[in-house]
Image (cartoon, grey):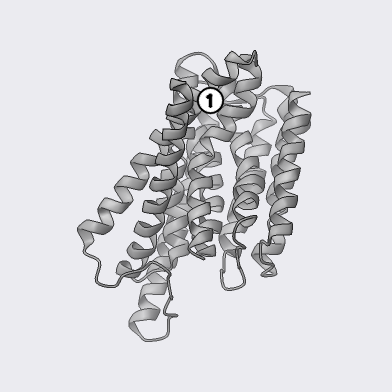
Amino acid sequence: MVPWLLAGLGLGVLVLAGDALVKGAVNLSLRLGIPALIVSLTVVAFGTSAPELLIAINAVIGNAPGIAMGNVVGSNTANALLVLGLPAMFAALHTADTDARKSYLQMMAATVLFIALAFAGVFAWWSGLILLGGLALYIGSALRAARRHRRARKNGNGDNDDLDGADPSMPGLKIAMYLVAGLVGLPLGADLLVDNASIIARTFGISDTAIGLTLVALGTSLPELATTVMAALRRQADVALGSVIGSNMFNLLAIIGVASLIGAIPVDRAFLTFDLWVMLAASVMLVPFVFFGQPVTRIWGAGLTAIYLTYVWVVLS
């Protein structure tokens, strides 16, 4: 009974933390005069990737580097399919006014770079430096975009974002409290839910391997899922899409980049022949939403979710 209660508590923490992070992000964007998309691509994305970073570092230190690799690849696949698909089944994401084309192309470039480095057979320290160099370029690009937007707003040429949940009079301290609550609560809630879900799974005779392939990758994507659900309910498609794209960028560049500096991460052949290509294909599926303004409707959401569940079934079988 206790694991069930703690798992439910973890889910509740995730929902509340996701709501707090979305509120903090949109109000920070309003305060700084930059698009909510840029805040989501950086602050929100980094916060929702915190569980993957903690797991990757612990896995390498604990001499289980395969968990780090599997967690990143599995989380990115879950982000592109489940994290966008499941919330859309409750509230459609209208992406027509969200210009995420540049950041999406950056994500695809990072994905191709990651796959190319994987074919070296191991992520060593030099691979980590290359990935972290790509992260520096990405953050620099986001900062330049933010500065351009602020200059345009100052000159009266920028768009005035109508952000649901934004409060122009919200004090800076309150915005900071929302952000901290979200950034701290998301990894804590995910950890609480994953740990207790693992205990529940073992009571039903599910192996540790099966738990790692499903619960770990899915569990570390729960912060992104919680954030995207709240963004969808608040009709913040830019926050939802930015969180997914930015989180995938941080997963590929920052997490494996940092972890490979701590210790080498060997690449299992199964990744080279199957999982990496599924991750790439899942990323390509975002093209209609990013480039053609196709809303992520309930039908799209059901389709993406079904594809992800099929992938999990294939992996487990």
Crowding near the residue tagged with mark 1, few <14, some 14–19, many ≥20 C-alpha atoms within 10 Å:
many
Classify residue 56 as left or right of residue 93: left
Q: Does residue 265 appear anywhere in the picture?
A: no
Query: Which is more toward the observer, 246 or 188?
Result: 188
Left-right relation of 116 to 238: right
Viewer can see residue 276: yes
- Outermost residue on the front side: it is 1
Residue at 70% of width from left, 69% of height from top?
A: 292
Q: Residue 209's x, y, as percent?
A: 64, 17
Answer with left or right where residue 63 lies relative to residue 43.
Answer: right
74 or 203: nearer the eye? Answer: 203
Count the numbered circles shown: 1
Q: Position of residue 102 (x, y in %)?
A: 58, 63
Residue 203 lies, in percent from the top left, at: 58, 14
In the rendered view, tell whether residue 237 sits above or below residue 193: below
The residue lying furthest to the bottom in this view is 156
What residue is drawn where x is 75% and y is 36%? 311
Q: Give how far across and how far down residue 194 sits, in percent.
A: 50, 28
In the image, is residue 292 above or below residue 103? below
Q: Quadrant of the C terminus?
A: top right
Q: Residue at x 64, y 63 (%)?
A: 290
Which amino acid is tagged 1? Answer: Ala
Quarter of the view holding residue 96: bottom right
Residue at 53% in and 53% down: 229
> Secondary structure beneath disc 1?
helix
Q: Which residue is mark 1?
A: 197
